[in-house]
Image: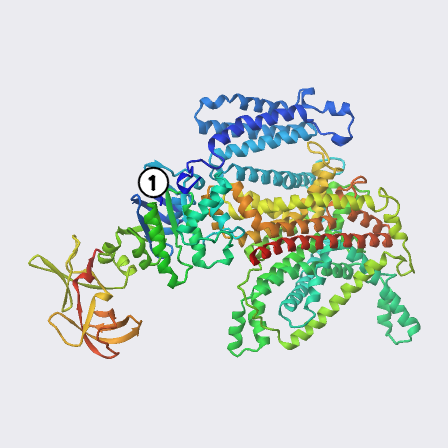
Amino acid sequence: MDSIQDIPINKKIGFDERKMGLVNHRFFPIIGILSFFFFPWYGLEYGIFDSTSDELLEAFAWQSINLSIVPLTIFILFLLHPWQFIPQKQGIFLSVIALIIGILIVFIGSEILNESLGLGAAVQVLVLSLMVSTGAAQLGFLRRDAFMSGAIMFIVVLVLLFIFYPLTKIFIQMFYTMDDQFVPLQFFEVITSPGVGRIVWNTLLMAVSVGFSTTFFGLIFAIYSVRSTSKLRSLIKVFYILPIITPPFVVGISLILIFGRAGSINDFLSFLFGTGGIFIPEGVQGFFHASSYIYGFPGIFLAQTLAFTPVSYMVLVGMVTAINPALEEASLTMRASRWITFRNVTLPLLRPGIAVSFLLGVMSSAADFGNPLILGGEYDVLSTEIYFAIAGAQLDFGRGAALGLLLLFISLSVFLIQKKWVGTTSYVTVTGIQTAGNVIPLPNFLQKILSVIVVLWVTLVGVLYVSIFAGGFVKSWGADNTFTLAHHIELWGNGITSGGWPSLLNSITFSLVAAPLTGITGVLIAYVLTRKKFIGKGFIDFGTALIFAIPGTVVGIAYILAFNEAPIELTGTAFILVVTMVIRSIPVGIRGGMSALSQIDPSLEEASLIQKAGSFKTIRFVILPLLRPAIISSISYSFIRSMTTVSAVIFLATAGTSVATTYILDRADNGDYGVSIAFGSVLILTMLFFTLLTQYIVGRSRTERQVKIKQ
Amino acid sequence: MMKENQSIKVSLKNISKLFGDVKAVEKINLDFAPGTMTTLLGPSGCGKTTLLRIIAGLEIPSSGNILFNDKDVTKLSVTNRDVGMVFQSYALFPHMNVRKNIGYGLKIVGISEEAISEIVAEVLKTVGLTGYEERYPDEMSGGQQQRVAVARALVLKPKILLFDEPLSNIDSKLRRTMREDIRRLQQESGVTSIYVTHDQSEALAVSDEVVVMNLGKIELQRDPEALYRQPKNSFVANFIGDANILEGKLVSENGRHSVLLGGFRVNSNSIPSNLDSNHVKVAIRSEAIRLDENQSDNCLECEVIWRAYIGSAFEYTLKSSIGNIFAVIPSSEKHFTIGDKAYISVSDIGVSVLEN
């Protein structure tokens, strides 16, 4: 029987020096050598599964003299372990340098030789990287924590490969014309070419306007939902979910249905003017008859406001909830009325949130692609212009690259302003001081005004969504309103390999793969950034900031430039789409992770370390269980985001890897609004289903704990 | 309970820690005798918590060495250092019950589940929480949580026990019983322990030795009674207990030293050497003061300008020719009211001459 006296305390726990040494000298090199023999070194044009056996065989490293010699030599050297004769520290240092040089040779060499790297190369580079990180840990990096060192290495590789490498390619492309001529000043030529100034102005004007409108409405709804005493409050909670699960441009399409040339409003109005006999002044009649008022600035403005207000709402609702009621109570006791208190105490307290939400609105609008594409009309903005530079007959990558960098510059500036100005409130925690329900109600007249606005908004959104669902069942909205199942039959009724099925299934599959990857990586990055201090942290910080700030179209064009040719050819594969989805939705995962981590007492991890758990076990037994709600919610959000993402994937999806959003956009571009809106409605239902499923799962895991307590 | 454990000696040699430009601790040299409880005492920002965390391995010193029984552990990671730590916020894992919390470390080192249950039951008995195995932290009071935290710290037979202001979040009434329990546990187990607090009465009550710190440096290190009686400098005198610090002249008569404060003379048993006789500082404990309505041959005339009743005593602020004096007089003695004239006399044991 073990008792306290007999506990063998002298066990050395954790990934200690000797084990680390063995891993680097034996385990990793053996894996490396095995992959040399069993995985193809070169990239295969048709992928591993679709290549002929000849093609496959040729791709293996041992078939020819090539760069794979470098990693192979390194692995063999490590097995022989010749530097056991030098002082240990120097030996490890030298070997880490050798490893890094090996990795660089593989990449730069392949770039120069124009050879495409395959699975084998990827595995070997991965092994080399892990050896670097383990070696760094042995040298004292991160207090000898090999696990964390490996995790950080993984993040660094991710950021380098999928952020810096593509951005570098864009940057270089800027200097080359369509026929590969080196024109150093092309960037300036593009910037100063006719039309670009107008496009930039359009983009900025729209972005700032949307910034204002989304913040305005977000503020209204946030205050209303937290402070009003009306029963309408619950309505908001339902309605703010809707735009999140809707592909952004579907809202745009429904706007066309309602307000467009053949739209319901025009129908209704012509009914009014024509046969209704109501007197309307000439000018007003003329305005409505122009009937294309929804295209251009008004349409984009309306669509983006509807789409991005929920984000503003989420930022502000947290801040409104977190206001310490004692401050307002103090104001009231000093004889200020509720209105004066609201104006002089409440609103100023909300200023950081208002600033954040404004800047977020600006960034979202500048990056938005789907709505300007559908509703833009003559109103050109940067995101669509980039698309047209490449997708159209022009194929002017130089122009696309220049415009892309311009858009990136705008977005990055706004992001950095937000970071500097507001600091860490860019991720809002909802842990205010617990108010025990003592919420100060709104001044009466304010509540009435807000109620009216809320009702109008909800009505508009309601009408739009009705049209989204109804539109799928109508032959040709506005022109021929007969009920028909033709659209849905075309999409779903012709077998699983035609119509909408391939792209829908692709979307779901890719998103289901991307979501957990995002969840895990996002939490890992959040953990590393909030809890650890190390050399190179600034690099990861900056890389993460870039991920936050890059607009989707810029990602699209960057990935085409980076991954359409050697050394890493990934375009046309499902892999690159999954990666794009992960990159596009990881910011929310990181933010959620940081917010959740800020609520976990750091001494919990310290206690775990003291109880002899290394950092891997601490994360597994202490951090992850406590972060589970945040991880689940970021997985769920990532799924939705990946299902609705369009601005990046539109560049990368091919016939074989088409996704729901590109399909819808294609059909809408053709004018087949019926089919595209039918698909859109099915997409919304799919995501609603998954959202509710997630809520159910999260809800159940919570009640399990409650049951335990009751016993 | 665990007397077989070898108590170890802890030594700090020239430990410094910088956070950017801020010197949190500066050239600390400190020895902790085996089996003792030493308290690091000082105001916020004095560096006591930083020092504790350096000993634990949670911070790496910028320079200097830490030795456990003459073995250098400075580079040893916290996981391998065999320390136990009790945190101010208890740091109990909220998603685990008491058994899993205490058994956490045991599971990590590979003890079997049945053995864990037995060990947990035994250690819960020691801290007086038998039967609490299935409870979760949010179902227990602060005092109970702290006991679980202490149990968890003890269960892996640590070489040293560290306490980081463990009673700060406990109701004041409960603090006394809890610190007695902690002290008793420490003495029974014989583990070398280091305790951090800013509460000086707590420090005096639990420790074999107290180290007073200020601004990253050590002011004084001695046993509680000597510390209280001979604070040696004005910082310590002010920090420990209430002291009136006055300036006067040092006079010697027949080998006996006393300090002249105006016309009033106070005696002290210990006088440090190397003092400028014309300006010496003297600390007079507020409870060493006696108030009389009648004069005596060595007394100081004063007037009561403020008083507060604290149940067991009266706190008086007295105006005199040598300044304002703060006195704490037991309620059993004669009461004075504001405006009264009185005469102060001082008992020798409450007087100490300060070095600076």
Q: Residue A191: in sight, yes or no? A: no
Q: Residue furthest left?
A: B254
Residue situated in front as seen by the camera: A542 or B11: B11
Residue situated in front as seen by the camera: A703 or B85: A703
Tell me which corner region of the image, top left, top right, bottom left or bottom right, holds residue B242. bottom left
Residue A145: percent from the left, percent from the top?
50, 38
Element under disc 1: loop
Name the colouring of the figure: rainbow
> What residue is disc 1 on?
B4
B158 displayed left or right of B312: right
Q: Residue furthest front?
A: A1
Q: Residue at x 88, y 66 (%)?
A: A267
Label 1 CA crowd tier, 10 Å (few <14, some 14–19, many 20+): few
Residue B324: percent from the left, percent from the top?
24, 70
Tell me which corner region of the image, top left, top right, bottom left or bottom right, holds residue A231. bottom right
Q: Pointer 1 indicates a residue of which chain?
A: B
Residue situated in front as seen by the camera: A195 or B297: B297
Residue A646: percent from the left, percent from the top?
75, 48
Q: In which quadrant of the rendered image does the C terminus of chain B lie?
A: bottom left
**Amino acid beneath label 1:** Glu
Q: In which quadrant of the rendered image does the N terminus of chain B lie?
A: top left
- Identify whether A94 is placed above or below A486: above
Q: Residue at x 68, y 52 (%)?
A: A694
Q: Residue at x 75, y 61 (%)?
A: A302
- Identify whether A129 is placed above or below B269: above
Residue A208: percent from the left, percent from the top?
68, 59
Residue situated in front as seen by the camera: B293 or A293: B293
